[in-house]
Image (spheres, rainbow, N blue to C red):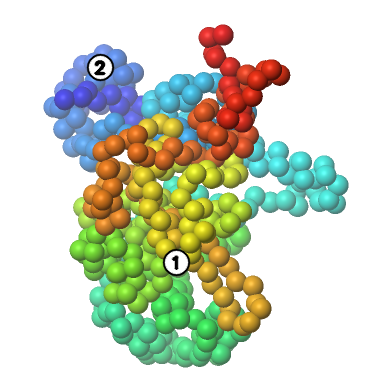
């Protein structure tokens, strides 16, 4: 049985409760010196002490278990890329920091990102665009992505409230539109009209929800459910948004919209019913879209939120990217390493999906730290309907760790145990650790290049032997 070292977490809990080491030691019936050694990882937590800690602090024993820090380490590499390049910190330093002091690591990640954003603003202002630094605010949309990323794409209170309302209304496939229309009319006096030139517009004065006639039934249901969230859970939306953002700020308003959209998906796809269907279908996305009458993207997004305690689904990451590599959606219940430094890996199968729209592409991908993932990807195109009007094309990716892949239908026929069969990918060329990748677009951060005018290699940026 592996030993459990959790000194930083133990110390943080004690300080949060404003307990001295002597006071906590008395509660645990151990000596202060023994507690001090545990807090400094000189001694592991024993089972008796661990059980008493769960009683004293009211936390689950899993709180003290060893955690996968790969996600935090990847964020540190991203945020502190310049410091790595300058040899001020090493990858091993980041791994130790993430393991021993995750709260401090999180602060450094935030500071690094703010520094990167400030540098970008100054650069743009210096290019003579006529903008001052103050006129280039931090993107609220990026802040919203971080809001959901920090919560691993699961909002427990909103999910429960939506499921309770679904039970009250009797939400079921095939009757969602009728039920939501009746709720809007009977409870709120809101009439639904399919006459909008926009996707939707709510006229609060006339109590009319205008929807585009081009929306499919599932899209209409989603817009109606979102409006119900604003009408029936307005205070709760504000409370959740205020956890991270000041009221009436742009990010706060966007957070309210994001939470309302989450509520809408949880209302038309109630957690327990959808979780059961997903498990029975082995997460077959196309079967689920047919069963619930909703779009491919909506089902993928909902699958990435099934992380209710004691009733968890497969922990998925969900992404939406365009042909240029811009990532417009990035939600994750896993530790998959999303790049924030610009660009993603061209060997990732989400880009292969553009070559054959409508077909689901499957890939087992390996990250530089050895973690392997099963990814499905499919390209979708949306049109406003008129001839000659430009459409929108995206690739949607849904992935999970290989240890969960056997629960997913897309793993059938794959050799999941063969690590050599996985496609090696990375977070993005700028911070990827793979030095032998022929697809690399920029030199690696923390390695010296081997520049030789008398030879060339297939790898575009060969690195020097560190011992040479």
The residue that mark 1 highlights is 358
Q: Is residue 247 visible?
A: no
Q: Which residue occupies 80% across, 45% down?
A: 125
Image quadrant in which you'd find residue 88: top right
Q: Which residue occupies 35% across, 48% down?
A: 374
Q: Is residue 367 above or below residue 85?
A: below
Of all residues shown, which one is farthest toward the left?
48
Q: How many tags in the picture?
A: 2
Q: Which mark is residue 335?
A: none
Q: Which residue occupies 58% across, 86% down?
A: 196
Residue 205: x, y in percent?
Answer: 57, 87
The residue that mark 2 highlights is 43
Pick the front one: 392 or 159:
392
**From the viewer's perspective, is the residue at label 2 or at label 1 nearer?**
1
Left or right: residue 174 compared with residue 232:
left
Q: Is residue 349 above or below residue 69?
A: below
Element under label 2? loop
Element under label 1? loop
Dot 1 alpha-carbon crowd within 10 angstroms: few under 14, some 14 to 19, many 20 or more: some
User: In terms of sequence position, does the residue under pointer 2 or pointer 1 come before the other?
Assistant: 2
Pick the front one: 241 or 425:
425
Q: Which residue occupies 48% across, 38% down?
A: 426
Quadrant containing the C terminus is top right
Residue 248: x, y in percent?
Answer: 59, 62
Of all residues shown, which one is farthest toward the top?
468
Q: CA distance from mark 2 to mark 1?
A: 55 Å
Pick the front one: 247 or 145:
145
């Amino acid at each position: 049985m592996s030993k459990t070292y959790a000194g930083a977490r133990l110390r943080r809990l004690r300080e949060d409760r404003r307990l001295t080491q002597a006071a906590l030691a008395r509660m645990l019936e151990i000596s202060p010196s023994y507690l001090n050694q545990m807090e400094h990882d000189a001694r592991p937590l024993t089972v008796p002490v661990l059980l008493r800690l769960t009683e004293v602090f009211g936390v689950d024993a899993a709180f003290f278990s060893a955690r996968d820090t790969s996600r935090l380490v990847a964020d540190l590499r991203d945020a502190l890329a310049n410091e790595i390049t300058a040899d001020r910190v090493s990858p091993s330093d980041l791994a130790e920091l993430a393991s021993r002091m995750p709260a401090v690591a999180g602060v450094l990640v935030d500071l690094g990102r703010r520094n990167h954003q400030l540098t970008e603003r100054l650069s743009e202002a210096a290019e003579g665009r006529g903008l001052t630094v103050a006129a280039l605010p931090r993107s609220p949309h990026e802040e919203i992505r971080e809001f959901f990323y920090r919560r691993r794409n699961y909002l427990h209170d909103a999910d429960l409230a939506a499921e309770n309302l679904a039970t009250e209304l009797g939400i079921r496939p095939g009757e969602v539109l009728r039920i939501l229309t009746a709720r809007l009319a009977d409870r709120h006096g809101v009439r639904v009209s399919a006459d909008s030139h926009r996707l939707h517009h709510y006229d609060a004065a006339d109590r009319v929800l205008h929807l585009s006639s081009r929306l499919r039934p599932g899209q209409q249901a989603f817009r109606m459910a979102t409006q119900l969230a604003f009408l029936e859970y307005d205070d709760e939306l504000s409370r959740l948004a205020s956890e991270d953002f000041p009221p009436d700020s742009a990010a706060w308003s966007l957070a309210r919209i994001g939470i309302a959209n989450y509520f809408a998906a949880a209302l038309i796809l109630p957690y327990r019913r959808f979780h059961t269907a997903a498990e029975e279908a082995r997460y077959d996305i196309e079967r689920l879209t047919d069963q619930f009458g909703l779009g491919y993207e909506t089902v993928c997004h909902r699958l990435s939120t099934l992380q209710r305690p004691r009733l968890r689904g497969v922990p998925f990451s969900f992404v939406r990217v365009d042909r240029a590599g811009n990532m417009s959606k990035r939600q994750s219940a896993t530790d998959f390493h999303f790049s924030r430094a610009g660009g993603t890996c061209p060997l990732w199968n989400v880009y292969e999906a553009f070559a054959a729209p409508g077909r689901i592409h499957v890939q087992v991908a390996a990250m530089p730290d050895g973690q392997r993932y099963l990814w499905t990807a499919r390209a979708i195109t949306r049109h406003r309907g008129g001839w000659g009007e430009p459409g929108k094309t995206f690739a949607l990716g849904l992935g999970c760790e290989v240890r969960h892949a056997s629960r997913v239908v897309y793993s059938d026929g794959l050799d999941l145990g063969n690590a050599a069969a996985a496609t090696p990918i990375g977070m993005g060329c700028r911070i990827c650790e793979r030095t032998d990748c022929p697809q690399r677009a920029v030199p690696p951060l923390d390695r010296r290049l081997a520049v030789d005018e008398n030879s060339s290699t297939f790898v575009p940026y060969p690195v020097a032997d560190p011992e040479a």
